[in-house]
Amino acid sequence: MILEKNYKIMVERISAWRSTKQVVVLVSGDPCFFSYTKMLAKDIGRESCLIIPGISSMQLAFAAIGECWDDACFMSLHGRDTEYAELVKKVREQGKVGILTDHKNTPAIIARRLLENGIRERRMFVCENLSLPDERVHEADLISALNIKTNGLVVVIITKK
């Protein structure tokens, strides 16, 4: 069963199946980090869940740019439309912001939103297809980031210059 916007149906089916079957839920991204894990554990019961993580995309991204991430803050624009006010606030207040993106919330759009809100003195790292053969990492100021095109899974990190 593929989860798109049918979360309630999926939970109902898992609840029904788990009395007679072992159920596995494979979720893209990082479990417990802006993922369905939180809702599943709440709705199905945490004691019924065995969560098996891999290396997270944020770990890979910060390693790729050679930066520690214990002083960063994080947010997700993945599948979200109205988080830009929060993004602007975090980028203004924090030294490092790690951002999960999607095909609509691209690095170029993020750069444009920051520039529109008067934020200029920042570096953007665009970490694309991390751990895959076509992995790429771009580093740019926000104006140059307006021209970055991506085709894959992307984590954006914004730092002060």
Image (cartoon, grey):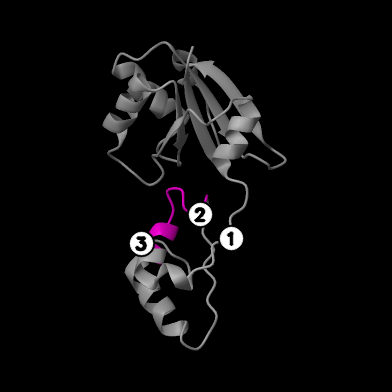
Q: Residues within 10 Å of mark 2 (few under 14, many from 20)?
A: some
Q: Residue 5 carries which label?
A: 3
From the image, state whether disc 1 or disc 3 is nearer to you. 1
> Going from the N terminus, do you reach mark 3 or mark 2 first?
3
Instruction: Determine the CA span between mark 1 and mark 3.
Output: 24 Å
> Going from the N terminus, do you reach mark 2 or mark 1 first?
2
x%, y% of residue 128? 59, 35
Judged from the image, the secondary structure of the residue bearing numbered disc 3 is loop
Check the image and name the residue furthest to the bottom: 20
Q: Can residue 128 be seen in this view?
A: no
Q: Residue 52 carries which label?
A: 1
Judged from the image, the secondary structure of the residue bearing numbered disc 2 is loop
52 up-or-down from 57: above or below: below
- Taking the image as shown, residue 129 lies to the left or right of residue 107, namely right
x%, y% of residue 25? 51, 67
Q: Mark 2 points at which residue?
A: 31
* C-beta proximity under 8 Å, tags 2 and 1: yes
Instruction: Determine the CA span between mark 2 and mark 1.
Output: 8 Å
x%, y% of residue 89? 30, 25
Residue 5 position by quadrant: bottom left
- Range of residues picked out in magenta: 30-40
Instruction: Determine the CA span between mark 3 and mark 2.
Output: 18 Å
Q: Residue at x 54, y 67 (%)?
A: 50
Q: Residue at x 43, y 64 (%)?
A: 3
**Residue 70 part of the magenta-drawn span:** no
Instruction: State the residue in front, 86 or 82.
Output: 86
x%, y% of residue 53? 58, 55
The amino acid at mark 3 is: Lys
85 up-or-down from 22: above or below: above
* C-beta proximity under 8 Å, tags 3 and 2: no
Q: Residues within 10 Å of mark 1 (few under 14, many from 20)?
A: few
The amino acid at mark 2 is: Pro
